[in-house]
Each structure stands twice: as structure tokens, then as C-alpha cells.
Amino acid sequence: MASLDSVQKWDTECDVLICGFGCAGAAAAIEAADTDPGARLLIVEKAPAEFVGGNARVSGQSLLISKNAEALKTYHRAMSANNPVAEELLEEWASRMVALEPWIEKMATDVGSEYLHGTGWSTRDVVLEFPEFGAAEAVQHTATILPVPSGVWLALKANVDKRGVPVWYEAPVVDLIQDPDTLEVFGAWIEHQGKRKAVRAARGVIMAVGGYEASPDMQRNYYGLGNVKPLGTPYNTGDGVRILQKAGASMWHMRNPGQSGGIWPGIHDPRQQTSYLRNFMLPSFSWVDVNSEGRRFYGETNELQLTHYKMKSNGRWVDVPLHVADPVHMIFDETTRQAGRLVMQVMTWSAVVNDPLNGREWSEDNAAEIEAGLVVKAGTIEELAAKVGLDPAVLVAEIQAYNAACEAGVDDEHGRRSDTLQPIVTGPYYAVRLTPAIVCTGGGAKRDMDGRVYDHDDRAIPRLFEAGELGSFISDLYQNGSYLTEAMITGRGAARSAVAEIPRSGSE
């Protein structure tokens, strides 16, 4: 932390300083402005204006809507059994969740956007990830805001713009300014326009700067992942985790299984910092995934996106072992190559942000990626194996075994869905390296639904608040649509808490 002695003069002042301009930061700004229209607000955002929005901009935009608080608590309690959350926290979250939908609808209608029951990018009305835990009773429907992609984020940003909340872009928070004895927060040091500026926050600071999924060092040290790329923003490099640790906060949920959002099959273009997501809606199934030995290792087509890439093993939901099997290759034939793009276009930073800004997109028939060498092509499976560093005899035997399972109509070894057993027989043949890809990380400072951050003695740190992905209360398994809605709830709660603080007077 930085003490008041580090400040010779304050460069600027506000009532509430909001660090981060994703879903949580936007919700905080909207709620603070609506709660106290006279409050002086300032948002500081690490990314340039064209890259603003965090993971909210490129997520699936799913919003969990529930109308049964008791069922929702039961469901989340079961999903969190391996790392329980406090009952009072669960109670507060559930009660706010069942009351959230009208606010979301208002955010959409106030800026001329369309609120939709459904995912927006598929025909599903609802995604129920873990039915055995009570999903059907807990989740009334999935919702979103159009357009696809980015509709939820665009509506929230438009609401912030409408309220005239000032934003500093390319302005990362560097440190909090605190009393070293009481830990009370007075403001923050911000890098802005090439200068370090002391920003005084008369009522409080809200940290909503996202997680650490784009930090290779933190991924290695907190989760043991040596080769992983984010699906979302490249600006989530763990700044908030480091700053809150220095601030004296008690940390939690730093190593949820799969970081709750799961470890997904990504395809990384080395020209980008982030990863594409392999297309889970590809209509052709003449493909398999093989591990570093050239062998299949799971049921590839079993709609694992519906459980955020968790699979049942030994009676428990665990991560699909893409990170354990790495390097993994997707092996496919000409039929799949012609069936459509290998990657999703309605989500991920690579597809939604980078491609449009760079004036390109993944080619419909994958031909451009073959030409660029991202997808490897060969006339035979033996030749393909040699090109990607696999034992040709092993890979040939594995494809033969898979094709035999297709002919038999049952995959005894890996339990792949029978309706997706489509043989790999039409040359030429292709391989693409799959990169373990992360949706987001939930670790951060321990907090409540009003954003209050707690120290190691379970005391709230004065005038410090946290919201969104950073410090999420989700501790184990994750239900689709919970992250964005939690970001809204905690952003709004943190804003109300901060605005309610009595403003300091004088130069403190």
C-alpha cells in the first residue's frame, strides 16, 4: 500500500473512484449516479477506449434469471459443497438475484436495446448445467440483451454514457493510498497520460478490475498451468489481486477447480494475446482430439460447453483434462474442414474485438488458416502425424479404432455420443493445436454482496470495496449466467455502500 505520506498534493478528487470499466464497474457507476446524482464519480480503466469492456464485452452474454430464492440457494449450495460459502452470503445473493430482472430490463429499454429470454446465439431458452443439483427448480430462464455479440456490455456502457460519468482510459490503478494502521483507504495512485496521479476518493474506492487469467506467472503459481491463454480480455493481468494483497485483504477462491469457468479447447493464433474458442456448434463430427501421445482421452462431442467443460469422474465433476493432456491436437478430415469455421464468432476477445479491429476474421472454410500454417494439412494420417510431432503408428491406430467405433455405433472407451460418431475418412487430413483456454478467474479479496472487503481478522477495510470477477463468491462449480449477474449485484451493492459513506473533509 501507499501511505498518505506518498502524496504531496492530490491531482484530482472525486467522491467514488471506480477502478475498471467492465460489467461490475459499469453497474457501480450507474447505481452510484442513480443513488446520489450529486456524487462526483470517476472511472479509471486500464485499457484504451477501443479495448474497453473487459470479459463482459466478449462473454456469451448469458444472464441467469431465477424467481425461486430457496431453490437457487439449494442449487448453489450443492455446487459449492467442496468449498462452501457462508449461508448469510448465499441468502443475500439469492434474494438479490430473484429481484434483478426488472433492473436488467430497464437497462436495456432505457437505451433502446432489446431484452431477450434466451441465449441470443442459440435456440436454447435456458442452460441447466447440473440438473442433479436442482438446476431446473433454481433457473427460470437464461436471458440476454441484443445485439449478439456484446449486447449486455453495450447496454451498460450506453447507460454510463447517458449519465455523463467521466472515464479515464489507459489509466491503470497502481496502488491504494491507505492508513497503514487502520487500513482506511483515502484514494489511489493512477497511471494516466504518462504521469502517476494521486486521486483522492472522499467516500471510497471500488476495485472492479477483473482477474488474473492473462497473467502467465499467476496461472503457473496459482493454478499450475504452464500453457494457457485467456478467452477474454488481455488486460486482466492480476493487478487487483496484487493490490488487494498489499492492502491487507484476506484472499479467497484463488484456485477453484477450472477457475470455475472451466478449461476450454482454444485455438491460439500467435499474432494475438488471447485465444479463439473451438466451435462447439460445428455441424460436422469427423474429428477427434488426441493427447501428447496421439491418443484420444475423453468424449469430445458430449456438449461439454453445457457444463463449462466439467466432466464426471469418480462421481465428481472435474475439469476436462485438456491441460493435463497438453499438447492436444484436433485431428479432422476434409468434410469437417468444409463444414464451417473451426472457431466461435459470437464470443472471445480474438473473434469479437481483435478480428474486427484488424480488419480480418477467421475464414469460413478455414483455408486462410491452412495457408498461414495455423492449421496443418497432409495427404495421409501418417504424414499428418509426422508434421505435428506425433508417432504415426500410434495416431493411425487411434483413428482406425475411432472409425471402428463409428461403424459399430458405440464408443466403448470414451463414451462419445453415438449421434456424433462420424468417421475420419475423407482426405486430405488436418490438425490444429488446441490451447487450454480460460474463461475467467474468480479469486480475489473476500467480500460481501455490498462489496465490503475484509481483512485477515474478518473486519471490513474502511472505504474499500470490490465487485465483479475479482473476488467472486463463486467457489467451485459455476452455473451459466452467474458471473455477469453477480457483477451487476456486487457492482450495485458496492456503489450503494460507497455513496453512503460520509465524505471526508479537508486534505485527508
Image (cartoon, rainbow, N blue to C red):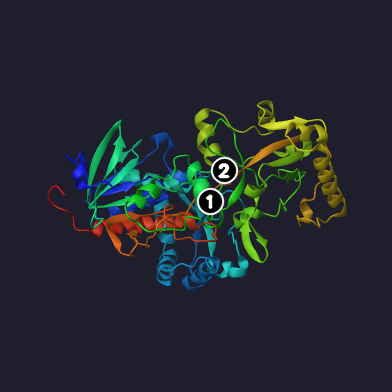
Q: How many marks?
A: 2
| Residue 110 visible in the snapshot | no
The amino acid marked with disc number 2 is Val
Residue 142 located left or right of residue 452: right
Query: Where is residue 249 shown, x and y percent of the image?
Result: 35, 56
Query: Where is residue 258 shown, x and y percent of the image?
Result: 56, 54
Residue 20 located left or right of residue 197: right
Residue drawn at 13 percent across, 52 percent down: 505
Residue at the extreme bottom of the image, as rendered: 70
Query: Going from the N terminus, do you reach mark 2 or mark 1 first?
Result: 1
| Residue 4 visible in the snapshot | yes
Residue 141 located left or right of residue 207: right
Query: Where is residue 196 shown, x and y percent of the image?
Result: 27, 36
Q: Which mark is residue 223?
A: 1
Q: CA distance from mark 2 to mark 1?
A: 10 Å
Query: Where is residue 422 shown, x and y percent of the image?
Result: 80, 47
Q: Secondary structure at mark 2?
A: loop
Q: Are marks 2 and 1 in contact (CB under 8 Å)?
A: yes
The amino acid marked with disc number 1 is Tyr
Q: Which residue is mark 2?
A: 228
Mark closer to the observer (2, 1): 1
Residue 78 vertical position relative to residue 330 in the rendered view, above or below: below
Residue drawn at 50 percent across, 48 percent down: 221
242 or 474, which is in the foreground? 242
Q: Secondary structure at mark 1?
A: helix
